[in-house]
C-alpha cells in the first residue's frame, strides 16, 4: 500500500512539473482581445504546409518499423524468434504508455511481447537497455556534429540555461545523506536476499535473462545491418525535424546546421523524465528558436506546440490501434464442434 502511495505521489509530482512547464511556455503567446491562445496555435497549424507534415508522418512510421526490426534482430540473437508484426505492435504500445508514464514504455513493450510470444520480460528488457545504450552513443554523435556546425550559438544557448552548480555545505550534506540511505537500502536488500533462497533464485534467474538480452549484440548474425539500421533510424529522426521546420513560414528559412542544432536540443528535451517529453520540449525548443535564430517568441511557442502535438497524435493513434490489435491476437480461439460429433 505504501509503495502505491509513493508511486502515485511521484506521478502527480511529474504531472505538476509538466503542467507548470507547459503553462510557462504558453505565457509567451500574447493574443488580442477576443482571441485565445488555443486559437493562435490552431491558426499556426492551419498555416502549415500539410505535405511536409504528412512527410514527417512517413518518416515517423519508417523509423518505428526499422526500430521494431532492429529489436527483432536482437531478440533472435538470444534464441527467441519474434515476428516483425508482434515486435511492431509491442513497440507502439510502449510508445503509447510512455506518453502517460515516463519510461514506463520500456517495460510495457517487453510485457506486451511476453503476452504475444512468451519471451521472458527480463530477456527482452536486456535488449531494450542495449538499444538505449546504442541510442545514447548516437545522441553523443549528434551533439558533436551540432556543436561543430553551430559552436558559438549553442555555447551561448547553454550559458543562458540555469545549470550553474549550487556549491556549499548544504549540497554536500544532501549528497552524503542520499549516499547513506542508498547504503542502508543496499545492506537491507542484501540481508533479505541472503536469508530467502526463493528471492535469491528468482533474482539470479532475472539477472541471467537480463544479461542474455544485454549481451545479445555479441551474437548478432549481421552486426553491419544492425549498425546500419541504427544510423538510418537517427537520420529519419533528423528528417522528421527538418520536415516540420520546413512546414512553417516562420522557420522554413532555417538551414541544415540550424535544424541540426534544434534537433539536438529537442532530443535532449525528449530525454527528460516527463510524459512524452512534454514541458521540457515546450520550454527548450522555443528558447532555442528565439535565442539562436531570432524567431518571434509567440511563433516559436506555437510552432513547438504544433510539432510536439502532431508527433504525439501519431503515437496515440498508432499506439491505440496496436493495443486493439494486440487484444485481438490474444483472444482465445473458439472451439468449433463438427456436426457429426456428439456432445455428452
Image (cartoon, rainbow, N blue to C red):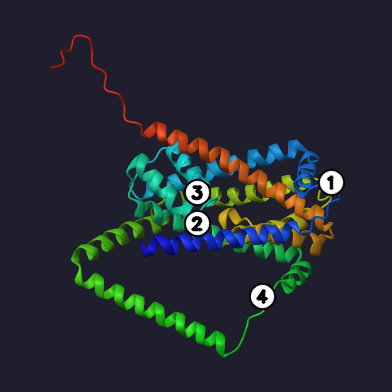
**Position of residue 238 in the picture relative to residue 102 (left or right):** right
- The quadrant of the rendering that contains the N terminus is bottom left
Give the residue number, with chain letter if any, for mark 2: 103
Numbered disc 1: secondary structure: loop
Q: Is residue 264 visible?
A: no
Q: Quote the CA–CA distance across marks 4 and 3.
A: 30 Å
Viewer-nearest residue: 342 or 248? 342
Q: Quote the CA–CA distance across marks 4 and 1.
A: 39 Å
Q: Quote the CA–CA distance across marks 2 and 3.
A: 8 Å
Crowd class of label 3 (few under 14; some 14 to 19; many from 20; radius 10 Å): many
Give the residue number, with chain letter if any, for mark 1: 34
Q: Mark 1 or mark 3: which comes first in sequence?
A: 1
Crowd class of label 4 (few under 14; some 14 to 19; many from 20; radius 10 Å): few
Give the residue number, with chain letter if any, for mark 4: 163
Viewer-nearest residue: 109 or 87? 109
Where residue 192 appears, as percent x and y from the top left, is: 25, 72
Q: Which residue is drawn at 55% across and 44% down?
A: 64
Numbered disc 3: secondary structure: helix
Crowd class of label 1 (few under 14; some 14 to 19; many from 20; radius 10 Å): few
Mark on residue 14? none
Mark on residue 97? 3
Q: Mark 2 or mark 1: which comes first in sequence?
A: 1
Amino acid at each position: 500500500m505504501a509503495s502505491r502511495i509513493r508511486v502515485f505521489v511521484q506521478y502527480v509530482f511529474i504531472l505538476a512539473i509538466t503542467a507548470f512547464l507547459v503553462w510557462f511556455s504558453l505565457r509567451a503567446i500574447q493574443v488580442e482581445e477576443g482571441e485565445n491562445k488555443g486559437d493562435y496555435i490552431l491558426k499556426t497549424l492551419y498555416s502549415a504546409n500539410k505535405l511536409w507534415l504528412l512527410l514527417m508522418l512517413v518518416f515517423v512510421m519508417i523509423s518505428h518499423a526499422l526500430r521494431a526490426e532492429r529489436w527483432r534482430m536482437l531478440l533472435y540473437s538470444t534464441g527467441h524468434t519474434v515476428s516483425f508484426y508482434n515486435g511492431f505492435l509491442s513497440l507502439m504500445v510502449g510508445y503509447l504508455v510512455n506518453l502517460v508514464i515516463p519510461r514506463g514504455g520500456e517495460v510495457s513493450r517487453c510485457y506486451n511481447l511476453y503476452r504475444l510470444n512468451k519471451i521472458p520480460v527480463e530477456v527482452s528488457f536486456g535488449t531494450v537497455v542495449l538499444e538505449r545504450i546504442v541510442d545514447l552513443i548516437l545522441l553523443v554523435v549528434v551533439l558533436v556534429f551540432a556543436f561543430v556546425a553551430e559552436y558559438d550559438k549553442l555555447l551561448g544557448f547553454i550559458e543562458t540555461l540555469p545549470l550553474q552548480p549550487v556549491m556549499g555545505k548544504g549540497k554536500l550534506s544532501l549528497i552524503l545523506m542520499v549516499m547513506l540511505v542508498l547504503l542502508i537500502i543496499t545492506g537491507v536488500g542484501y540481508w533479505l536476499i541472503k536469508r530467502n533462497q526463493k528471492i535469491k533464485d528468482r533474482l539470479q534467474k532475472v539477472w541471467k535473462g537480463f544479461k542474455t538480452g544485454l549481451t545479445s549484440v555479441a551474437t548478432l548474425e549481421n552486426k553491419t545491418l544492425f549498425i546500419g539500421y541504427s544510423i538510418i533510424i537517427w537520420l529519419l529522426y533528423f528528417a522528421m525535424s527538418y520536415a516540420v521546420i520546413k512546414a512553417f513560414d516562420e522557420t522554413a528559412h532555417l538551414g541544415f546546421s540550424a535544424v541540426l542544432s534544434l534537433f539536438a536540443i529537442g532530443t535532449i528535451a525528449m530525454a527528460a523524465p516527463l510524459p512524452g517529453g512534454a514541458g521540457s520540449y515546450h520550454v527548450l525548443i522555443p528558447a532555442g528558436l528565439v535565442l539562436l535564430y531570432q524567431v518571434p517568441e509567440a511563433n516559436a511557442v506555437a510552432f513547438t506546440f504544433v510539432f510536439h502535438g502532431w508527433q504525439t497524435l501519431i503515437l496515440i493513434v498508432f499506439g491505440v490501434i496496436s493495443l486493439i490489435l494486440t487484444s485481438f491476437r490474444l483472444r482465445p480461439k473458439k472451439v468449433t464442434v463438427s456436426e457429426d460429433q456428439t456432445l455428452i
